[in-house]
Image: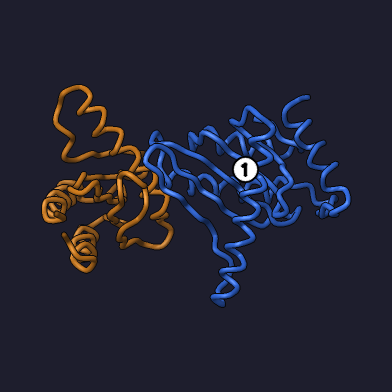
Chain colours: A orange, B blue
Amino acid sequence: MTDAQTVLDRVTRVTRVPGVRGALVASALDGLVVAEQLMDGVDGRAAAALAGSLVGRLVRTAEGAGRQAPAFVQLRAERGSILAAPCPDDLVLIAVVGPDANVGLARLEMLDAASRLA
Amino acid sequence: MRALEPWVEVPLQTFLDESSARLTLLMTSSGQVVAQHGFSRSLDVMTAAALGAGIGASTEELARLMGSPRFEALVHHGARQSCLLAGFSTPRGRWIGLVVFGPETSVGIVQLFFDQMVQQLASAAPRDQPATPTLPENFEHELDASLKALFGR
């Protein structure tokens, strides 16, 4: 079981990627925040609830279709993206990034962090 | 969805649309029903309102004993459905929301949109009509009238 400090350390690493405005770990089942590191103006509670729900549904959809659960999700919007990586124990790592973010590097950091959150 | 006062309808309907809640009951802190969604029998509403108001009063007293401000919300997690009970202030006095939801949504989603509904209710409440607490002697009449209005009989 990963301890709280380790979870926060993983989240902090993701936020060091240029353009990342915040990252958090949420419970996909409950949509509640487990750990967060966010810039002012980023609503972690809303991100956890909505992105957690989205990822939970995507995982169930993939499984329902007989496919493997997605390892990484990118939801692109006009002014940035929401990145999400499902983790073990029904957790999901979520990052809120601006339009100028290095999404490739953020993806690598998130996949690495997600694999260690077990 | 049925509401006693029209200005409650839009915030409550938005909450229901966004949260996928199965049952919702809005009541005053004394248990007078303001709006309901999903209940089919007035007896169920009456029971839920009485229990919700009782739990709200108990948790407020517990908070007072612990020397802390009010608890914002109480969540019971169940295997097949869960329940959120939250008190909130409105320009018409203190109200309580009781929400029952299933695994098709999450407690995070329900809480998020419940808080939005509280803000919308605060904005939508008519300012020219102050809160009128129900007096003990006309409580039964008020309750009966509320249930008739909510169930259309």
Q: Residue at x 19, y 40 (%)?
A: A72
Q: Quadrant of the C terminus of chain A?
A: bottom left
Could you tell me residue B94's position as x and y percent?
70, 56
Could you tell me residue A108's position as x and y percent?
12, 50
Q: Chain of mark 1?
A: B
Question: To which quarter of the image does residue A19 belong?
Answer: bottom left
Q: Nearest the camera: A11 or A62?
A: A62
| A59 lies above or below B94 | above
In the displayed image of the protein, which residue is found farthest to the top? A65
The residue where tag 1 is placed is B48
Could you tell me residue B16's position as x and y percent?
55, 35
| B80 lies above or below B133 | above
* Total numbered labels: 1
Q: Residue at x 85, y 51 (%)?
A: B128
| Residue count near mark 1 (Cα–Cα under 10 Å), binned few <14, some 14–19, many ≥20 | some
Q: Amino acid at mark 1?
A: Ala
Give the side of residue A20 with respect to residue B145, left or right.
Answer: left
Give the side of residue B139 with respect to residue A108, left or right.
Answer: right
Q: Nearest the camera: B121 or B65?
A: B65
Q: Quadrant of the N terminus of chain A?
A: bottom left
Q: Residue at x 73, y 53 (%)?
A: B30
Q: Nearest the camera: A85 or A61?
A: A61
Q: Nearest the camera: B66 or B6?
A: B66
Could you tell me residue A77's position as x and y percent?
35, 39
In the displayed image of the protein, which residue is found farthest to the right? B137
Secondary structure under badge 1?
helix
